[in-house]
Amino acid sequence: MATLYGPSARLIWSLASSGIGTTITGAGNSGPWSNTGVTLSAQTAIDLRDAVDVALMVTVGAITGSPSLTVLLNVFDDQGNPYAAPGITTAAITAAGNALVSGGLHGHTGTQLVLPAWGQVAWTQTGSGSVTGTEIALYAR
């Protein structure tokens, strides 16, 4: 009998379950950093304390107009300053489809990152129009 490697991957944040909505027409994020404790909701900083690696998955159902969507993982220092996590940024999404980026301790050459305690999924949209049927999911292990 084979021994399974642990820990298992788990969903730690999802746009669909956040209450934010699935139509994007501008910039946004999963929520701000706070030093008021560890009480979390779907729209606060993302708890990365048990994460070694992350996978950021983005699905776009349709594009109206000519927008360009970019999604990334920010990480926070102990004072709440955000930093773009190296390598965990999608290329510009300009058509329906999906994108996947990953990183962390076992990241690609030159982009390994020891994840801090808290993070934030953020997105920017340039151009006119909207991105609909959007799902952003952040998995960790």
Image (cartoon, rainbow, N blue to C red):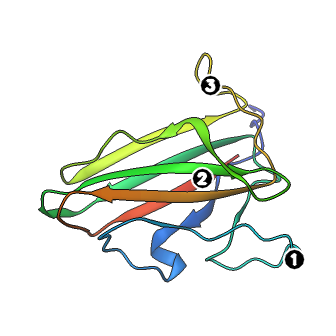
Query: What residue would you read off at disc 1?
Result: 36
The type of residue carrying mark 2 is Tyr
Q: Are marks 3 and 2 in contact (CB under 8 Å)?
A: no
The x, y position of residue 30, in whole percent, is 56, 68
Q: CA distance from mark 3 to mark 1?
A: 31 Å
Within 10 angstroms of label 3, few (less than 14), some, or many (20 or more) residues? Answer: some
Residue ID at (20%, 57%): 127
Within 10 angstroms of label 2, few (less than 14), some, or many (20 or more) residues? Answer: some
Question: Which of the marked residues, 3 or 1, is nearer the chain's N terminus?
Answer: 1
Q: CA distance from mark 3 to mark 2?
A: 18 Å
The type of residue carrying mark 3 is Thr
Instruction: Give the secondary structure at mark 3.
Output: loop
Q: Is residue 17 left or right of residue 118?
A: left
Question: Which of the marked residues, 2 or 1, is nearer the chain's N terminus?
Answer: 1
Q: Is residue 40 left or right of residue 90?
A: right
The x, y position of residue 23, in whole percent, is 30, 74
Q: Nearer the viewer, residue 128 or 92?
A: 128
Question: Which of the marked residues, 3 or 2, is nearer the chain's N terminus?
Answer: 3
Which is more foreground, mark 3 or mark 1?
A: 1
The x, y position of residue 40, in whole percent, is 75, 77
Residue ID at (48%, 39%): 101
In the rendered image, the quadrant that contains the N terminus is: top right
The x, y position of residue 6, in whole percent, is 77, 41
Query: What residue would you read off at disc 3?
Result: 111
Which is more foreground, mark 2 or mark 1?
A: 1
Instruction: Give the secondary structure at mark 1.
Output: loop
Can you say whether 97 is above or below 47 in the image? above
The type of residue carrying mark 1 is Thr
For residue 139, which numbered disc appears in the image? 2
Within 10 angstroms of label 1, few (less than 14), some, or many (20 or more) residues? Answer: few
Residue ID at (77%, 35%): 114
Instruction: Give the secondary structure at mark 2.
Output: strand
